[in-house]
Image (spheres, rainbow, N blue to C red):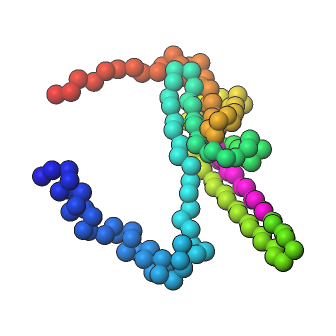
Amino acid sequence: MSTKELTRRLDQFPSVFDDFFKPWGDWFPNGGFFKPATVPAVNITDNKDQYQLSLAAPGLKKHDFKIDIDGNMLTISCEKEDTKEEKDSRHTRKEYNYSSFTRSFTIPEEVIKEKIEASYDDGVLKIALPKKEEAKKTALSKQVQVK
């Protein structure tokens, strides 16, 4: 079966999610008050010296983020509110936009919590979670043969 035929067949079957959310689309054009929540994508990299957490969050400022550590839980949250107002002699138009998200991660035991650092640059929040010395020494590196 060619890619073209497969694409045509897939187009004939509606998505389960399309059916589930269909009433919202009928009742509220353009989603109305119901807008699916968006949570930024996160990449976690395990390096020899640290874990690196990268969160894609363009359009924000570094003061929009709140990063908390409670026990072994790292929580990243953000709240942003925008208000726009346009006035002319006959009309006033106000627009409000509010967005927020929260992501939580369990911090591994080998992380030095006091040395966790964060930076925000070019729409990416980066959090460095440095490892303890004994964790660096016992890092297992192995190649597995495929049978």
Residue 7, located in which quarter of the rendered image? bottom left
Q: Nearer the viewer, residue 129 or 43?
A: 43
Q: List x then y, in percent, for residue 119.
A: 69, 33
Q: Is residue 72 visible?
A: no
**Does the stretch in magenta take in 83?**
yes
Left/right placement of residue 20 relative to residue 97 reads left
- Location of the C terminus by quadrant is top left
Residue 112, located in which quarter of the rendered image? top right
Task: Determine the main secondary structure of the stretch shown in magenta.
Answer: strand
Q: List x then y, in percent, for residue 69.
A: 69, 43
Q: Nearer the viewer, residue 101 or 70?
A: 101
Residue occupying the point 57% across, 31% down: 52
Considering only vertical position in the picture, is 13 above or below 23? above
Q: Nearer the viewer, residue 44 or 121?
A: 121
**Does the stretch in magenta take in 119?**
no
Residue occupying the point 42% across, 77% down: 22
The furthest residue to the bottom: 27
Span shown in magenta: 73-84
The furthest residue to the front: 89
Residue occupying the point 56% across, 68% down: 35
